Image (tube, rainbow, N blue to C red):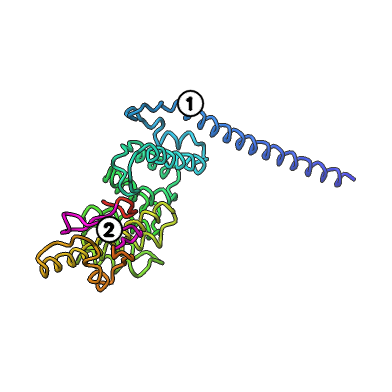
Amino acid sequence: MMYQQGSEQAVAARLGSWSRETLALSLVVLLGMMAVVALARWMERYRPANDAEMVAEELYLTPQSAKRLSLGFNGLVADWYWMRALQYVGRKVMNHSGDIQLDDLSQLNLKLIAPLLEATTTLDPQFTAAYEYGATVLPAVDIEAAIKLVQKGVVANPDKWRLRHYLGYIYWQQGRYAEAKEAYLDGSRVAGSPRWMTAMAARMEAEGGGRTVAREMYRAMYEQADDEQIKLMALKRLLQLRSMDERDTIRRVLTDYKAQTGRAAASWREVAERLRAARLNINEQGTPLDPSGAAYVLAEDGYDVDLGSHSEVPRK
């Protein structure tokens, strides 16, 4: 009987200990969630109002401060900053009149995009989508911030070869082909990296500024990116490169026509057969069509060709 009573007391004591531990853990979780909610409300409350020119933008918490205040809920707060970054760019794009490309947002005065992405990746260093987005958007805004961000991602994610690809992409955009080559060579050594990383490194040294490299670059981005915006950007750049090749062909046709006839073409119909022989896509009226399906237009009084007003091919 005494043994049974002692066992019951031991079980009761253990249950009591578990209850206290569970209560303490629940209290910590509850306090943490309350702190995160309070942090979000504080940031929303003290977010500076945007004026018409967006000249007073400031990041109201540094990445380090946000990390300290997150109380271990870094992933949740990182998601919050990530959504802020996307909304920030989205609002700027919506308020902008005219065509604009994801990899050339220099007209939007994106003062906060670098610190927002820095905060996101400080809170969650494995947030690869933020690095990839930054590699696409940041170079036109702040090239050094873009390089610093992706280099940070490379250090924090040594097994992610795609981050080396994006670092090489940034260097390639800037014409820094030697550094781009090193980034691709570094990426080619990562386990699981595709063979084209090595080939890209070799091409950087031989023909870094050529269209062939550009085509391979954007094709790789289109195939590898998870972000649909990045895929769309890469697709548009591929259309642009194809259109550039087509316009070079059309210019040769126009030049040959003038050399043989002594005058410029007055309409596309006059050179339709030549365009067809050059394997260009033309409509029933003999007008060549660009990769988006829009008609090219004769320019410079028949001596040149340009994109039409309805073309979806980027102009720059």
Q: Which residue is mark 1?
A: 45
Tag 1's secondary structure? helix
Q: Position of residue 157 (x, y in %)?
A: 40, 54
Q: In the rendered view, would you say 102 is above or below 77?
A: below
Q: Which residue is mark 2?
A: 296
**Relative depth, front residue between 251 and 203:** 251
Q: Residues within 10 Å of mark 1 (few under 14, many from 20)?
A: few
Residue at the far right in the pictured view:
1
Seen at 31% across and 62% down, the residue is 289
Compared across the picture, whether 47 is left or right of 184 comes to right
Compared across the picture, whether 82 is left or right of 106 comes to right
Q: In the rendered view, would you say 146 is above or below 306?
A: above
> Where, by quadrant of the figure, is residue 12 drawn?
top right
Q: Kindly identify the amino acid type of the residue bearing the numbered disc 2.
A: Tyr
**Relative depth, front residue between 290 and 270:** 270
Seen at 21% across and 66% down, the residue is 270
Contact? badges 1 and 2 (CB < 8 Å): no
Q: Kindly identify the amino acid type of the residue bearing the numbered disc 1.
A: Arg
> Within the magenta stretch, is there residue 174?
no
Q: In the rendered view, would you say 277 is above or below 143?
A: below
Q: How many marks?
A: 2
| Magenta stretch bounds | 288-308
